[in-house]
Image (spheres, rainbow, N blue to C red):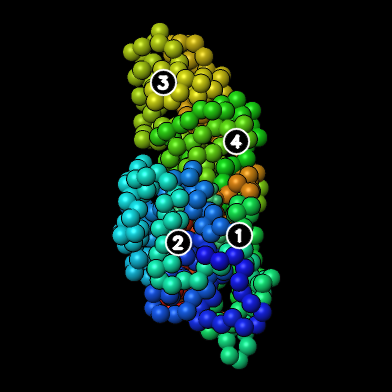
Amino acid sequence: MTAGGVTADTAACDVAVCGAGAAGFMAAIQAAARGRRTVLLEKNSKPGLKILISGGGRCNLTTTRSGADLEAQYGAVRGRFLRHALRSFPPTALRQFVEDAGVLLQEEDLEKLFPVSQKARDVVDALLSLAQQAGVDLRTGNPVLGIRKEAAGFVVETPNGTLRAASVVLATGGLSYPKTGTTGDGYGFARGFGHTITATWPALAPLHVDVPWVRALQGIVLKDVDLAVFDAHGRELLRRNRPILFTHRGLSGPAPMDLAGDVEEQRGAAVVKFDFAPGIARDQLERQWLEATKAHGRASVDTLLPAHLPERMRETLTTLAGASGTLAGLSRERARRLLEASKDLRVPVPGSLGFDHAEVTRGGVRLDEVDARTMQSRRQPGLFVCGELLDVDGPIGGFNFQAAFATGRLAGLHA
Ligand SMILES: Cc1cc2nc3c(=O)[nH]c(=O)nc-3n(C[C@H](O)[C@H](O)[C@H](O)COP(=O)(O)OP(=O)(O)OC[C@H]3O[C@@H](n4cnc5c(N)ncnc54)[C@H](O)[C@@H]3O)c2cc1C
């Protein structure tokens, strides 16, 4: 690894890869393994920063999901674009790739795969060592400032001089966690070659909710509760049954974070709905409650609520419905309100906590301008685009690294 080292107008290579994250590392390793003289330019003094901080420093590298189910996680359009990348390099292949490099993985909750060592550092070290073995010339502290095309190829500008390259791979990521170096530079480079950048939104971020009962539950974790996001017309956009954490600013944890991209796209008009008893239809629950009221009139009202809910959550629901006391004393109207609170409790969600807290960017280089089989630009031959810079994002669970590695691999195989 060298810092600096691109000398003015003398350096030349076959492939210049911009950005040493998951996608850029993979692209560079594949290109160099094909015998292409490959230079990997990274802005930061250290490569792979996002890998290092991912999964709480443990790196949820990929998932055990596969096939059509895997593709569906990215949504219909994005999933279709990723089909070739994911089928030619599925999670099992990524697992094999890092395990062959000495990083054993194990499955945890939500079908996530993590290093057995629980250290993201091991993944970065493995990528560094694979890059070195393949002959990648990694140059850290080398921000790409501009890229232009000349008759003989591309000219990549850095503060340390220019680099000539036959092909260029853009792997500079998106806008999330800008302090890690991802400040959207690649959008400008791609635009310069005629690409369209679709609207960008923070995704996989905690949700901002300014509702007193939500704030009051700070610290509470819910499981087996459905959370769904609705648009301004009351249409359900996405539903998740994954853990939910109440925070002083709103909602965090896998389900709320998965909804963030859809919330953001509603520009302040989104509503999020809780269903605290997702396994049972509303009329069936109502019948159960009637029977319970007849049989156990002296029991307290909160015994109607799912037993797995934390006590503070159950208290909140009964308070919101104004339904305290015994079942025998529960009026029809209050029972109806409690049913409403249990199955259909809605809060307005103006947005997420933004790019500083978002794990990923929704939006990016328009997918129909990129060849899904090679990641080559349809606007500029010799230019390749991969990773989060593309208009691709997935839910929590290793799907974003999987997409970055799989698209980076295709770019490296064809650049
Ligand atoms: C806190 C956090 C936790 C996450 N946890 C997970 C997880 O556990 N599992 C998962 O699947 N996903 C996770 N993600 C998402 C995942 O990290 C990204 O989707 C993935 O890193 C995208 O890979 P990439 O290579 O496209 O971009 P990045 O990893 O963002 O890499 C882009 C690289 O390009 C460099 N760069 C930018 N501009 C320039 C320039 N002008 N010149 C040179 N270099 C430049 C950047 O410094 C960076 O090193 C997490 C993200 C965050 C922020």
Of pointers 1 and 4, the one earlier in the residue sequence: 1
Which secondary structure, mark 4?
Answer: strand
Residue 24 vs residue 307: left or right? right
Q: CA distance from mark 3 to mark 1?
A: 56 Å
Q: Which mark is residue 289?
A: none
Foreground residue among 123 and 314: 123
* Residue 245: % across, % down: 51, 34
Residue 335 visible in image? no
Instruction: Report the residue at 46% width, 31% height from top.
Output: 222
Of pointers 2 and 3, the one earlier in the residue sequence: 2
* Residue 84: % across, % down: 38, 70
Asked if marks 4 and 2 touch (Cβ < 8 Å), the reply is no
Q: CA distance from mark 4 to mark 2?
A: 39 Å
Of pointers 3 and 1, the one earlier in the residue sequence: 1
* Residue holding disc 3: 304
Which secondary structure, mark 1?
Answer: loop
Q: Which mark is residue 250?
A: 4
Ligand 1 within 8 angstroms of badge 3 C-beta: no
Ligand 1 within 8 angstroms of badge 1 C-beta: yes
Residue 13 visible in image? yes
Q: Residues within 10 Å of mark 3 (few under 14, many from 20)?
A: many
Q: Indicate the amino acid at tag 1.
A: Asn
Of pointers 4 and 2, the one earlier in the residue sequence: 2
Q: Indicate the amino acid at tag 2.
A: Leu
Q: Indicate the amino acid at tag 4.
A: Gly
Q: Nearer the viewer, mark 3 or mark 1?
A: 1
Which secondary structure, mark 2?
Answer: helix
* Residue holding disc 1: 44
Q: Is residue 407 above or below residue 358?
A: below
Q: Nearer the viewer, mark 3 or mark 4?
A: 4
Q: Nearer the viewer, mark 2 or mark 3?
A: 2
Of pointers 3 and 4, the one earlier in the residue sequence: 4
